[in-house]
Every structure is written in structure tokens, then in C-alpha cells.
């Protein structure tokens, strides 16, 4: 994924000169991985050479300049990739989960009633 756009976004990250939020070590820029292209930018992964903490950041190009947003994660690069490549949760998934929880609640109440247990 070495397009010119991604290269420019990496230069932006370099200009930000990111530091680890845990130990303040400057990230080794050669360790920054581009995981995925996202709308208007890239999703990147950083890991700290000193403390080993991991950080993911989205860097986007907007009409007003570059915007970087990130967060610490307790995942390695492969684990992050697993979630990045997985399907999004749909409205139907949420409704199915809600229905299953309702069914479980009914089932649990029946077991408690059958066994003379109070909740
Ligand atoms: Zn660190």
C-alpha cells in the first residue's frame, strides 16, 4: 500500500513526530505500519521500542489539513489486523443479540421459578 497519498500521510505523521503516551519515547518511524486505507486517509499502528505499548491512529486528509486521531491498545499488530478485517456490526446483529438476551432472561426466570429461587 505504497501510494503517493499514503506516503504524504506518513510524512504528516513524521512531522507530528509522535511520542509514546506511556513513556514519552519518540516512536521509531520505521516501525509505523499502515494497516488499512480508510475514508480520506489511513489507519496506522505504532509500537514503542522502550515500553512495548501499542497505539493505533487514523490520519486523514481534509480540506482544512491533516487530522490524526489515536488511542492506546492492548493488542499486537496481528490482533489489530484481525479486527480491522472483520465485518462491521450491523443493526440486525444488535437486534439479534437483544432478542437472545430477552430469551435468556425468560429462560433464566423460568429456571429460578422452577427451583424456587428469587432474583
Ligand atoms: Zn513507551
Image (cartoon, rainbow, N blue to C red):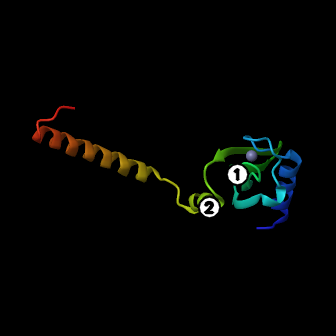
Task: Sort mark 1 into few (<14), some (14-19) or many (20+) by Cα contacts within 10 Å.
Answer: some
* 69 relative to 116 in the view: left or right: right
The residue closer to the viewer here, 45 or 58, is 45
* 7 relative to 57 in the view: left or right: right
Q: Which mark is residue 34?
A: none
Tell me what residue is drawn at x 13 percent, y 38 percent.
Answer: 113
Distance from disc 1 to disc 2, alpha carbons, whole Å, reads 18 Å
Relative image position of residue 83 (x, y in whole percent): 57, 58
Relative image position of residue 84 (x, y in whole percent): 60, 58
Residue receiving disc 1 = 52
The residue closer to the viewer here, 118 or 49, is 49
Q: Are marks 1 and 2 in contact (CB under 8 Å)?
A: no
Q: Earlier in the sequence, mark 1 or mark 2?
A: 1
Image quadrant where one finds the C terminus: top left
Q: Secondary structure at mark 1?
A: loop
Q: Secondary structure at mark 2?
A: helix
Relative image position of residue 14 (x, y in whole percent): 86, 51
Residue placed furthest toward the top: 118
Above or below, 119 relative to 14: above
Tell me what residue is drawn at x 38 percent, y 48 percent.
Answer: 95
Tell me what residue is drawn at x 75 percent, y 51 percent.
Answer: 48
Residue receiving disc 2 = 81
Above or below, 47 relative to 23: below
Q: Mark 2: is the Cβ under 8 angstroms from ligand 1? A: no
Tell me what residue is drawn at x 31 percent, y 45 percent.
Answer: 101
Relative image position of residue 115 (x, y in whole percent): 11, 40
| For discs 1 and 2, the disc positioned in front in the rendered view | 1
Instruction: Indicate the quadrant where residue 98 lies.
Output: top left
Image quadrant where one finds the N terminus: bottom right
Q: Mark 1: is the Cβ under 8 angstroms from ligand 1? A: yes
Q: Count up the numbered dots.
A: 2
Amino acid at each position: 500500500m505504497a501510494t503517493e497519498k499514503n506516503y504524504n500521510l506518513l510524512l504528516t505523521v513524521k512531522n507530528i513526530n509522535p511520542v509514546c503516551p506511556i513513556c514519552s519515547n519518540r516512536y521509531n518511524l520505521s516501525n509505523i505500519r499502515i494497516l488499512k486505507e480508510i475514508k480520506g486517509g489511513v489507519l496506522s499502528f505504532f509500537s514503542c521500542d522502550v515500553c512495548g505499548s501499542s497505539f493505533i491512529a487514523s490520519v486523514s486528509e481534509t480540506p482544512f489539513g491533516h487530522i490524526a486521531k489515536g488511542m492506546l491498545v492492548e493488542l499486537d499488530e496481528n490482533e489489530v489486523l484481525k479486527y480491522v478485517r472483520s465485518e462491521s456490526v450491523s443493526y440486525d446483529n444488535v437486534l439479534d443479540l437483544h432478542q437472545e438476551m430477552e430469551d435468556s432472561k425468560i429462560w433464566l426466570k423460568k429456571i429460578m421459578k422452577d427451583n424456587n429461587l428469587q432474583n
